[in-house]
Amino acid sequence: MNRKYRKTVIAGNWKMNKTPSQTKEFMTALKAIMPKGRWCDVALCVPAICIPAAVRAMRETRVGIGAENCHFEAKGAFTGELATDMLVDAGCKYVIIGHSERREMFGETDATVNAKVLAALEAGLTPIMCCGETLEQRQNGVTEEHIAMQIKLGLKDVPEDKIRKVIIAYEPIWAIGTGLTATPEQAQEVCENIRAVVRKLYSSKNARVISILYGGSMNEKNAYELLAQPDIDGGLIGGASLVPEKFVQIIEAANQPTV
Ligand code: 13P
């Protein structure tokens, strides 16, 4: 983390977990144990149907609610999809875009990811744009170029004055939901490379202020060490964001001074 230049962000990704009633219970429990005082930015991205309950529960707090996906068109015949304006109107501040599960299981490509990032920015949402390599890509030594390509294509046509609103999440696919975490050094190396790509595409100034998160089995035990890395500005957390006590411990890890 480098708090001097950029925001630290702890974001939960609930994936397809919890009902609206369970969302209300979770938020009540979270509010009761949330650290007091100054803390990092906190976001919870929840299933679309849980957004109203989450927004209602967290109205007077600094926890921002987000969606896990959006469509890139403003409206029209796209059965089952949600437009960015709908998410804004429902009270969302964030939207996760291009999660590897959506790329792998729902046919998302760098082109659709890019269209969604542009739509989210246009609507005033903070996109959390995901990237990450498979185990095979890592073993073949193509992690750096694969991720550089995802970043370049995902950020295509994002103007200079909007780039600092984008949050990038690095999630090695082999570490998601597997209990395998990238080592702090592995995660740092990729996040540093991502920042270098942003520097090349935009400027040093923009690269210095953009927040880059790590995701992939981050939990209350390994968070501090990962967050202590200079180019890791927060976490995108799956499983551990479903338990208020665990999620709070990760927020506390992000609030601790790094050495
Ligand atoms: P886990 O924390 O469950 O590994 O999930 C990570 C993730 O995919 C967050 O988007």
Image: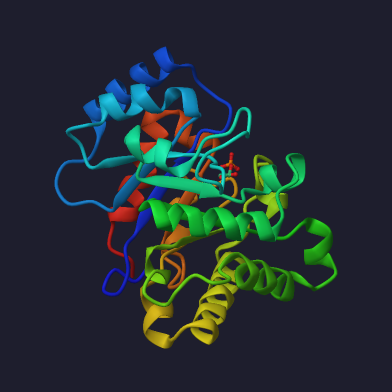
Q: Quadrant of the N terminus?
A: bottom left
Instruction: Name the quadrant where ligand 1 sits.
Output: top right
The front one of 243 and 145 is 145
Q: Is residue 257 above or below residue 148?
A: above
Q: Position of residue 66 (x, y in %)?
A: 41, 40
Q: Position of residue 200 (x, y in %)?
A: 54, 86
Question: What's the residue at 33%, 46% (across, down)?
Answer: 42
Q: Is residue 199 above or below residue 40?
A: below
Q: Is residue 62 above or below residue 54?
A: below
Identify the residue at the far front of this view: 76
Q: Position of residue 128 (x, y in %)?
A: 48, 54
Q: Quadrant of residue 130?
A: bottom right
Question: What's the residue at 49%, 54% (across, down)?
Answer: 119
Kindly tell me whether residue 46 is visible in this rendering: yes
Q: Position of residue 144 (x, y in %)?
A: 70, 74
Question: What's the residue at 62%, 33% (across, down)?
Answer: 77
